[in-house]
Image (cartoon, rainbow, N blue to C red):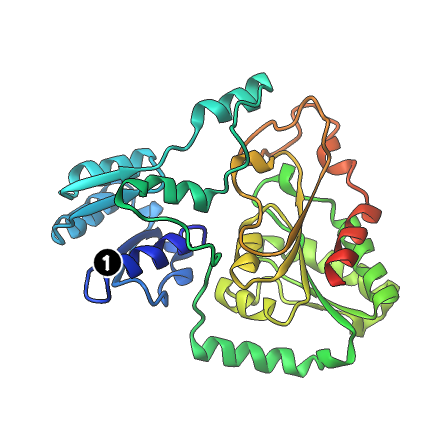
C-alpha cells in the first residue's frame, strides 16, 4: 500500500510501454495484482525457503532489468538486488540508526516526521522522481466491488446517520487498544450518533471482533453492528471501507488500506510513534497516542507484551479521547 504512490509516479515517468514489475509476499499479493501501473507481479512465498528465493531470483534475472528499487533493504532483498542482474539499483535509507537511538536511548534525532511513502521517493530522487501528493491508491476489481456493494446494500446503511468502521486487531499485542474500549466506543457512537458499526479483521481477529460486536449489540441493539471479520479478504475489506464515514483502527495494515480508499481515520498508536513513518498518509486522520511516556517507543513493529508490565501507552488512551477524535472527523 505504501509503495502505491511510487508505482504511480514511476509509471508516469517511464511511459505505458516500459516494463514495471513488483515483488511482493504472497499473502499481500491481492493488493497489487490489479494495480494498473504494473506489468508483472512476482509473488514470493516465505514458506518456500531458500529454494523459493532462488526460483524468484531466476525469474528476475531473465527479465534483464535496467533498475532495481529496493524498498526493504532486508537480507532477502539484498540478495535479490545483488544477483538479479539489474544494471543499476536504488536502495532505501531506513534510518536504522535514528530508529535504534529512539527505541533504546530515547533520543530523537529524526529531522522530522517523514512518512514511509516519502522515504520511498527519497530512494529514487536521483532519477528526478518526486511525490505527486495524490496519496495511496488501491485498485479493486469490478467483481469484488459489486459483491461487497451488494452486501452493504443488504444492511440498509442509509437508515443510519453515520457508518463507522472499527478494526480492533493488529499483529502485535502492544499495538492493540483493548477490545472492551472498542466495544464501549462503538456502543456510544451507535446510541449518541445513530451510527452503524462495521467490524473488520482477518481470521486472527475473529474472537476479538465477535466479543466487540456482542457487547455493542447488547448495549445498542443487534441492528447497530455487523461483523465481517474473517469473512472478507483484504480487497473486500477495502471495498467495504467505501461505505464508512470514519475508520477507527490500531497502527495496522488495515489502517493503510483505509488510507488508500481516502477514508477519514482515527488511528490508535501504542508502542510505536509517528517518527517511524507509518501514520495514515494522504487522507484526513487523527492519531491518538499517549505522549510523555519515558518508555515509549519500545519497538518499531510491536511486541508480544509490554516490557514494563503497565502497558500505559494503550491503557492511558481513554474512550472519551477516541470518541472526541471520531466526532471531530464526522463534522
Q: Which quarter of the figure is the C terminus placed in? A: bottom right
Q: Which quarter of the figure is the N terminus placed in? A: bottom left
Quadrant of residue 158 within the rendered picture: bottom right
Q: Pinpoint residue 54: horizontal percent, then vertical percent.
A: 20, 44
* Residue that extends furthest to the top in the rendered view of this protein: 105
Q: Pinpoint residue 282: horizontal percent, then vertical percent.
A: 54, 54
The correct choice, above or below, for 81 with respect to 7 in the image is above
The correct choice, above or below, for 108 with respect to 223 in the image is above
Quadrant of residue 11 within the rendered picture: bottom left
Number of marks present in the image shown? 1
Check disc 1 and report the residue beneath it. 14
Q: Pinpoint residue 193: horizontal percent, then vertical percent.
A: 84, 66
Helix, strand or loop status at disc 1: helix
Q: Pinpoint residue 95: horizontal percent, then vertical percent.
A: 43, 29
Q: Is residue 262 left or right of residue 159?
A: left
* Residue that extends furthest to the front in the rendered view of this protein: 128
Residue drawn at point x = 36 percent, y = 65 percent? 35
Q: Estimate how packed mark 1 is, as few (under 14), some (14 to 19) or many (20 or more) residues with alpha carbons within 10 Å.
A: few
Residue drawn at point x = 26 percent, y = 45 percent? 127
The correct choice, above or below, for 154 with respect to 239 in the image is below
User: For this rendering, which residue is in front, 196 or 94?
Assistant: 94
Residue drawn at point x = 50 percent, y = 62 percent? 234
Residue drawn at point x = 37 percent, y = 48 percent? 130
User: For this rendering, which residue is in front, 40 or 49?
Assistant: 40
Amino acid at each position: 500500500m505504501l509503495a502505491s504512490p511510487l508505482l504511480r509516479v514511476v509509471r508516469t515517468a517511464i511511459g505505458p510501454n516500459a516494463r514495471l514489475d513488483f515483488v511482493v509476499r504472497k499473502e499481500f499479493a491481492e493488493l497489487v495484482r490489479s494495480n494498473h501501473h504494473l506489468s508483472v507481479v512476482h509473488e514470493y512465498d516465505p514458506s518456500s525457503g531458500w529454494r523459493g528465493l532462488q526460483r524468484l531470483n531466476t525469474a528476475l534475472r531473465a527479465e534483464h532489468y535496467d533498475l532495481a528499487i529496493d524498498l526493504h533493504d532486508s537480507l532477502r532483498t539484498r540478495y535479490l538486488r545483488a544477483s538479479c542482474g539489474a544494471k543499476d539499483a536504488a536502495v532505501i535509507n531506513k534510518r536504522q540508526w535514528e530508529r535504534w537511538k529512539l527505541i533504546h536511548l530515547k533520543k530523537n534525532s529524526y529531522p522530522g516526521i517523514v512518512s514511509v511513502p516519502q522515504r520511498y521517493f527519497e530512494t529514487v530522487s536521483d532519477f528526478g522522481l518526486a511525490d505527486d501528493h495524490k496519496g495511496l491508491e488501491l485498485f479493486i476489481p469490478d467483481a469484488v466491488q459489486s459483491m461487497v456493494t451488494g452486501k452493504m446494500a443488504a444492511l440498509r446503511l442509509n437508515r443510519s446517520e453515520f457508518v463507522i468502521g472499527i478494526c480492533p486487531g493488529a499483529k502485535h499485542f502492544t499495538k492493540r487498544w483493548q477490545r472492551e474500549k472498542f466495544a464501549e466506543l462503538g456502543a456510544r457512537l451507535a446510541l449518541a450518533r445513530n451510527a452503524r458499526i462495521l467490524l473488520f479483521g482477518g481470521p486472527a481477529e475473529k474472537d476479538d471482533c465477535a466479543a466487540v460486536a456482542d457487547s455493542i449489540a447488547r448495549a445498542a441493539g443487534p441492528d447497530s453492528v455487523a461483523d465481517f471479520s474473517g469473512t472478507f479478504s483484504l480487497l473486500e475489506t477495502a471495498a467495504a471501507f467505501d461505505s464508512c464515514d470514519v475508520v477507527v483502527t490500531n497502527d495496522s495494515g488495515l489502517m493503510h488500506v483505509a488510507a488508500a480508499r481516502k477514508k477519514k481515520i482515527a488511528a490508535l498508536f501504542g508502542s510505536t510513534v509517528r517518527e517511524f513513518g507509518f501514520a495514515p498518509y494522504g487522507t484526513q486522520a487523527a492519531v491518538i497516542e499517549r505522549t510523555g511516556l519515558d518508555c515509549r517507543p519500545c519497538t518499531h513493529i510491536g511486541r508480544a507484551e509490554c516490557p514494563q508490565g503497565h502497558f500505559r501507552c494503550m491503557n492511558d488512551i481513554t474512550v472519551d479521547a477516541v470518541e472526541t477524535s471520531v466526532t471531530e472527523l464526522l463534522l
